[in-house]
Image (cartoon, helix red, strand yellow):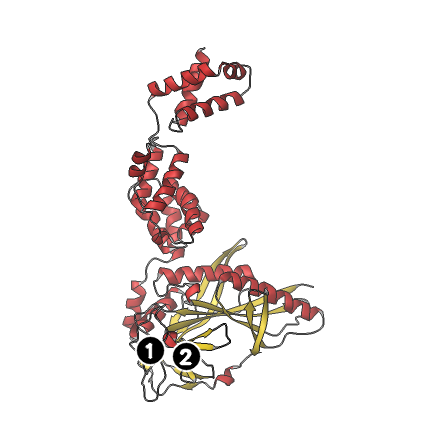
Amino acid sequence: MAYKTIIGLEIHVELATKHKIFCNCPNEYGAEANTLVCPICLGLPGALPVLDKEALEYGIKAGIAFNGSISNIIKMDRKNYFYPDLTKGYQISQAEIPFCDGGYIEIELEEGTKKITLNRIHIEEDTGKQLHSEDGMTLIDFNRAGVPLIEIVTNPDINSAEEAKLFLDKLRAILKYIGVSNVKMEEGSLRCDVNINVVNTKSNVKSNITEIKNLNSFKAVVKAIEFEEKRHIELLEAGSNTDRETRRWDETKGETIIMRKKFGVSDYRFAEDGDIPPIKIAGEWIEEIRKSLPELPHAKKERFIKEYNLSDYDAGVLTQSKELSIFFEDTLKYIDDSKLVSNWIMGDVLRRLNDDEIEIEESNLKPKDLAELLILIRDGKINNNTGKKVLKEMFDTGKSPETIVKEKGLIQISDEGALKEIIEKVLSENEQSIIDYKNGKDRALGFLVGQIMKASRGKANPQLVNKMLLEIINER
């Protein structure tokens, strides 16, 4: 039987504002528990919330970046439900009128570009955080309560775990580009819910939608989708069906676990928030925000392909991160060779960043220093292998390549007189290899080159060595 998977995502993004959404408490991560709180974010009686302008601005930035339509009316609603970390017994969110309607993100598949459409983006407050101790106690830290969130809701346009991953990668890159969130999943700044079901394409029989809550890594999203996809299909083939329920991903077991039956909209008893009157948004302000947006990843990628003659793949990788794209262009201010810079960043630089699990801006490497290293290699002062060693030292110490090369005496020998002495000495000690080479054994030449490099402690210019070695042998 043929099945089609239908997936919709709900992505919660914490906004990197200075303050919480309805009060002046700092919006900071990692502070001592319950120190960044006040009567408003604790939901104490009589405390009145006031919508933070920066939070709204950041939300509008995201809406514009995702090609959505921004509303001129901001209306806040109360979403009523009980949860231990919900201070007021309701969450201030948006129901009828989200600040952003529609939108889309395009992803690149082997068969071409696919548009994933958005249903809406709305703004709301985050809840507190439950901390479960080993002795069975549950403590609550309310520092996170009232942190501004946007919830990005897709239409069910996604049909595989791969598409979900591509969509989330692009969404995260854009959010980071425009500077509205640090999108650090390990800090809870980006969390994802998955709604999934499957349909038998021959009989049109569908499984019931399952929601998987609070996935905190893209790897977990992929695994949860693949697990649920298989579970839904197996149930349909057995003549059964899934329940409409909310589940969570258990990383240890590698499976989803039921949490509760799925809520409907009516269960939340949405009502207009009487403490926050509707707010009119000037069209001029929305246009100001639109004009303030930086060049976005897809536009920058196209520019890199045209301006620097890069491949589609290379341009895509270099523009995935705003900081990496800036590093690339800053390096080109000191060396006019986009292909050479691209090759080194795509190769050794990214490999080291991945090994250290850091971003380019967190490393010791500076654009000017990378350019100086590549100039040393290009000009033949050090060879490629030495360059790799110098790059490692640059990452470890932050020293300039010139300093490292001088301290370690790594300058390549390109003086023909000095090289001739080394070559003649090696040849005099390896007469049989000369005979072998002249008898057609090409490997003998490689052996001689290796001996010359060893004698020069790796400093000999390999191109010059090969040229001079053949000339000297042929003269004998």
Residue 458 is drawn in which quadrant? top left
Real-space Cα separation, disc 1 to disc 2, in angstroms: 23 Å
Residue at the right extreme of this rendering: 238
User: Observer-nearest residue: 96 or 474?
Assistant: 474
Q: Which amino acid does label 1 sit on?
A: Val
Determine which residue is flagged by label 2: 94
At x 28% / y 71%, what residue is drawn? 285
At x 32% / y 65%, what residue is drawn? 290
Quarter the C terminus occupies: top left
Residue 225 is drawn in which quadrant? bottom right
Determine which residue is flagged by label 1: 37
Residue at the top extreme of this rendering: 476
Residue 8: x, y in percent?
52, 69
Residue at the front extreme of this rendering: 135
Residue 14: x, y in percent?
39, 69
Q: What residue type is labelled 2?
A: Gln
Question: Helix, strand or loop at disc 2?
Answer: loop
Q: Which numbered disc, 1 or 2, marks the residue closer to the eye?
A: 1
User: Observer-nearest residue: 394 or 317?
Assistant: 394
Decide if residue 240 is on the left or right side of residue 100. Answer: right
Query: Is residue 456 depicted above or below 305 in this figure?
Result: above
At x 45% / y 23%, what residue is drawn? 451
Q: Is residue 293 visible?
A: yes
At x 40% / y 42%, what residue is drawn? 344
Q: Which mark is residue 367?
A: none
Decide if residue 251 is on the left or right side of residue 318. Answer: right
- Lower sequence index among marks 1 and 2: 1
User: Observer-nearest residue: 465 or 274?
Assistant: 465
Question: Helix, strand or loop at disc 1?
Answer: loop
Quarter the N terminus occupies: bottom right
